[in-house]
Image (spheres, rainbow, N blue to C red):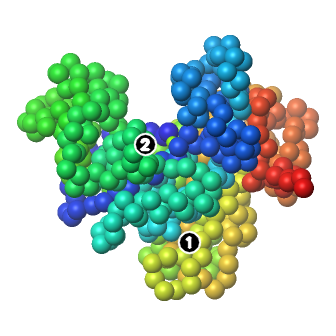
Amino acid sequence: MGRRDHSDSSSITMAATDHIFALIDCNNFYASCERIFNPGLEKKPVVVLSNNDGCIISRSNEAKALGIPMGAPLFEMQALIKKQEVKVLSSNYALYGDMSQRVMATLMEFSPDIEIYSIDEAFLSLNGFEHKNMTDYAQTIRATVKQRTGIPVSIGIGATKTLAKVANKAAKKNSAWQSVFDLVNHPYVDEVLEKMPVENVWGIGRSLSKTLNRHGVLNALQLKNLPDTWIRKNMTVVGHRLAWELRGISCLPLDMVVPPKKGIMCSRSFGKPVTALEGLKEALSNYTTRAAEKLRSQNSLAGLIMVYITTNPFNDMPYYSNAVTFSLPFPSANTAVLIRHAHQIMEKIYKDGYAYKKTGVFLSGIVPDNQMQRDMFVKEPDLVREKKLLRAVDAINYQFGSDTIQYASSGMIKPWRMKQAYRSPRFTTRWDEILTVKI
Ligand SMILES: [Mg+2]
């Protein structure tokens, strides 16, 4: 899940030293989240639907085995679903966002440098952990994530982010590797690359893979071995960088800002530790402003906001880390709204007496802003009033639960609402939907 656009930089930066990257990817993430709270879904084919119950966007292994394709429209699959008794669920982003945050918080304990790449994927830099057996370390990460969150993950390790991606795919493919594959110094790197079609290499878009195919480049190994002169003549800096990444030369450093669609992350480590709540809030305001700008620049709104803080887990100071995801009453790209929620979360998770190393905000549950517009009764001049109203409604909903006010009065606003006929309860983010156990 998640995509990155490699085209935003015009030059190749070569790594000065050797790197070790791990890509941690949650297996069938949405379907796995659903299973945690509903053991009845265990070992059964499960599919999760996109917004408005349109298409299938997550499948359990059992559903994959039935031949249900990713992205298939629900109506086309109805017959098969009935016949095979496939469990169908609407997407429950409040639950997935919250589970994601728990997974990420766990991963943060295994390396000081993390890039949250999408709701279910993160890169960790394992530089400085060379003395460890990488496969063992990755298995420890896997077991810890599984134990704390119930989410199964696969881990690929490589000298570059692109190779970590390749390793991750390999880890998923061969069950003998128990979901972990280390491609650093692996004797058969080239064999693995040869088996991977070039269009499956991370960051290779449709047009680039077509160009490559036309020139007889069909697999990742062929891309790796293309002469630099040929690359310079026929490819952009994007392709060039990917070829180098496949050779083990790291050109893509960890990035703290995740671009479009799945989520926008903005976080940074502090130059020196911050202890005061006010200082953290100030930093958070900056990051939220930046994230909101990004959101608006891609014409989208966020439905979920996650804020986290952490001290440095790698010194002997007391360790504390926490994160909370809040489901916005209305998807928003309004900086003021987002900052206010960010601050409210910060006030909840902040603990006095710790030296904080990092804070960040993650906006997800992304929807296009025209969907919001289309559903509104408001005309342009009313937008200012609408914004004021939105803020007030937010405040009430924040305090009393997100559905306290569902429709604003006087026809001003009709919140953008998803069709979610089969949505599971928001077990982890709503007190009134918490899992109950009958004894
Ligand atoms: Mg995944």
Q: Name the residue at 29% across, 33% down.
A: 196
- Residue type at mark 2 is Ser
Would residue 43 appear left or right of 269 to someone viewing this image? right
- Picture coordinates of residue 4 (x, y %)? 41, 41
148 horizontally vs 317: left or right: right
**Residue holding disc 2:** 175
Residue bearing mark 1: 310
Image quadrant containing the C terminus: bottom right
Which residue does the image show at 77% across and 50% down from the upper left?
427
**Foreground residue, 192 or 318?**
192
Q: Secondary structure at mark 2?
A: helix
Circle 1: residue type = Thr
The residue positioned 68% from the left and 43% from the top of the image is 35
Count neighbours of disc 2 (C-alpha within 10 A) and say few if under 14, some if 14 to 19, many if 20 or more: few
Residue 229 visible in image:
yes
Q: Position of residue 115 (x, y in %)?
A: 45, 56
